[in-house]
Image (spheres, helix red, strand yellow):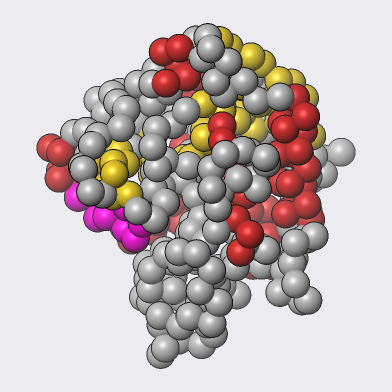
Amino acid sequence: MIGRSSRGGSAALWSGLSLCALALTGLVVGTPPDPTVSSTGAEPERTGAVAQVAHCPPGTEPVSASTAAMRVADPGVGAEGEVEVTPEQAAEYEERLREALGPSRDRQIAPPYTVPVVVHVISAEDGSGNVTDARVREQIDVMNRAYRGDYAQGSEGADTGFRFELSDVTRSVNDDWFHRFRQYDDTIRSQLRQGGPETLNIYTADLGSGLLGYSTFPQDYRAAPERDGVAIAHDTLPGGDRDRFNEGHTGTHEVGHWLGLFHTFQNGCESPGDYVDDTPYEREAASGCPVGRDTCPDRPGKDPVTNFMNYSDDACMTHFTQGQAVRMAEHWTAFRGGSARA
């Protein structure tokens, strides 16, 4: 349901962070990262920044801070005001996954037993956003339950095998970082990020009106390791003030991207959809909880509106599929941690 990650590309392909604004006023909220930042690391031919996708809940619409960059990238604007991963970008990600897997494609791939998590709580001097340790632990618990399949109804979901263990909580009191996280994104991550590709870094702050969160993809780590991680609005953690989105599944969703999943509505009704065989095709993102909706009537199955990789309300989201579990394990093996580890 929530904010999204995209891919690295040329500087023109920033497709970075679309800004969300009130639909009736067109008021731009916040300032995005610099779209001209270059990639570094072992892939010199990739000269662009890690592209990221922002999600705006219903009632908002995107306003680009860099109209030129947006037009050059031409990523298309998805449902609920999100700049979506294009079919071409998704295909490139898929190609990079298959190349990275190599011989591993022919054997069963298992997920890690535990993913270490570092949560960076960024708050304002007046105390805004100062998420308690208890709420941080509850967020990790929600993620563990979601990835274990505890929210699934009947046989709809799967235990993905992924587990999350909180290894550290950092706290930064900085008005600029809290209120203008996107503007200071690179600085914040360069100073706070811990661990390697196997460590999940989560940043909580005020992401602006309408923006719930965003993430990087595993394929982006090698070119820009300092950018790797997930940002979520502080009020989307369990017990937060974000109506309809305060049960912690923004984190669940964004970590799905961090582990390589596309949205269930990737590519709409066109093949190959989200590259997962057991998630039905879906023309557009879901809003609310429209169970029984069928936007691709010529394809088998109803829309996967209760899947964690949709845009439904937190209370509506219940599961990942077995195919998604396999895909996350493949990405882990290819880009994050290799084979299963204790």
Residue 146 x/y as whole percent = 72, 54
Q: Is 289 placed left or right of 93 in the picture?
A: right
Vertical relation: 312 (above or below) 232: below
**Residue at screen point 39% across, 32% down:** 208
Q: Quadrant of the C terminus?
A: top right
Most common secondary structure along the magenta stretch? loop
Q: Is residue 92 visible?
A: no
Residue 164 x/y as whole percent = 76, 39
Residue 120 x/y as whole percent = 61, 22
Figure quadrant of residue 109: bottom right
Q: Is 334 placed left or right of 12 in the picture?
A: right
| Membership of 252 in magenta stretch | no
**Residue at screen point 57% across, 23% down:** 129
Residue 62 x/y as whole percent = 27, 46
**Residue at screen point 35% across, 53% down:** 59
Q: Is residue 168 visible?
A: yes
Region of the chain picked out in magenta, as a range? 74-84
Closer to us: 127 or 340: 127
Figure quadrant of residue 43: top left
Residue closest to the far bottom: 298
Closer to us: 268 or 232: 232
**Residue at screen point 32% across, 41% down:** 20
Vertical relation: 155 (above or below) 186: below
Figure quadrant of residue 292: bottom right
| Membership of 79 in magenta stretch | yes
